[in-house]
Amino acid sequence: MFSRRLLVLFFTFWSSYGHGQVLIFTKSTIDSLPPGKLVGGISLTGSLSLERAQFLLLEGSVNGLYGTNRHTYEVAGSVRYTTYDHLPTSSRGFLSIRGNIWKRHLEDDHLVPHRFYLEPFAYLQYDDQRGLNLRAQVGAMGSVRLRNGTKSRFTAGAGFFYEYEQWQMIPRTNRIMLDTLPQAVFDLYQEYLGLNRQGQVQHYDPKTCAYIGYAGDVSPLVTINGMLQWQQPLLSPYHGKPIYELSPDFRRLWPRFMIDVRLMLHLSKHLNLLSQLMLQHDRGQLGSLIPYTNYAFQQGILVTF
């Protein structure tokens, strides 16, 4: 069945809005991937409109999954670029690397899945539109199969990761204003917020995380995957700075929530239609000019190999 070779496109809400660490593949691909085999997928989404001005959106993703007798390894990357009236308005992207360690073993030429396994990961992200110059994460989770039927699978996991963020608090186009500030005024910004001369604030934070995921082959033509993830910071964004004491809001540890749902319609062995619904709520983010809640609904073409 051609869905055995389908690799779900992962363009994280993390790449657009959040984390993107938890990569979701079809159940049939995970269960049937032979040792030493590589599968992957390439997706392209685009939009061009012309009203008072021309608007262009291009988005591409590449995904790969490789398996051994005991482990599987996942790599995903994505880039999005937009222009308005021929001028670049934003770009964003991510790179995610993840291992599924001791996930299975080979017995009598058959792959036997383990109920418990380890997921170390590394993740990089940038998002010009949100003022996020860089987000880097390194960590690991322990995962468990809650249910593993012939057509569907439920998994859950929890773990710990360390996150570094660099936010562009002052837009690059307005950064020259910082040079006009008296040194005493700039010193206050630096002391209370950690703002540097480039208009950036850096943040280091250990976090815990947990998720529950679903992967199901509804029919030979339809696959649905979903994920709900929660991330809990252990330090306030302004921990250790004087502003931390000014208001309880600066001391609260706001969690980050994400929902990611994919629906794929398999048109042929290698060609698929993909619909994605992604939502994130993050009240603890440093960017002050963006909403706490973001969502997106996208459709595109996914080619698998």
Image (cartoon, grey):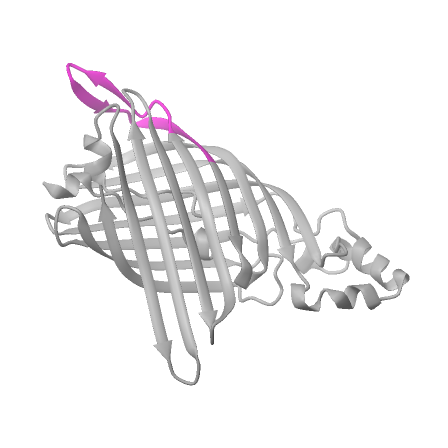
Q: Residue at x 32, y 60 (%)?
A: 45
Q: Toward which corner of the image does residue 76 lie, by quadrant?
A: top left
Instruction: Say if residue 284 shows up in the picture.
Output: no
Residues in magenta? Answer: 100-121
Q: Is residue 279 left or right of residue 160?
A: left
Residue 55 is covered by the magenta coloring: no
Residue at the extreme bottom of the image, as rendered: 52
Instruction: Say if residue 178 shows up in the picture.
Output: yes
Indicate the quadrant containing the N terminus: top left, top right, bottom left or bottom right: top left
In percent of width and height, residue 261 lies at 31, 54
Q: Toward which corner of the image does residue 273 lie, by quadrant?
A: bottom left
Residue 114 is covered by the magenta coloring: yes
Residue at the extreme front of the image, as rendered: 86
In percent of width and height, residue 286 lies at 62, 57
Asked if 141 appears above or below 287 in the picture, the reply is: above
Q: Residue at x 84, y 66 (%)?
A: 181
Q: Is residue 44 left or right of residue 118?
A: left
Count of residue discs: 0
In percent of width and height, residue 100 lies at 36, 29
Q: Residue at x 48, y 56 (%)?
A: 92
In percent of width and height, residue 253 lies at 60, 51
Residue at the extreme top of the image, as rendered: 108
Q: Residue at x 66, y 67 (%)?
A: 173
Task: Report the magenta stretch's main SS.
Answer: strand
Indicate the quadrant containing the C terminus: top left, top right, bottom left or bottom right: top left
Asked if 275 appears above or below 224 in the picture, the reply is: below
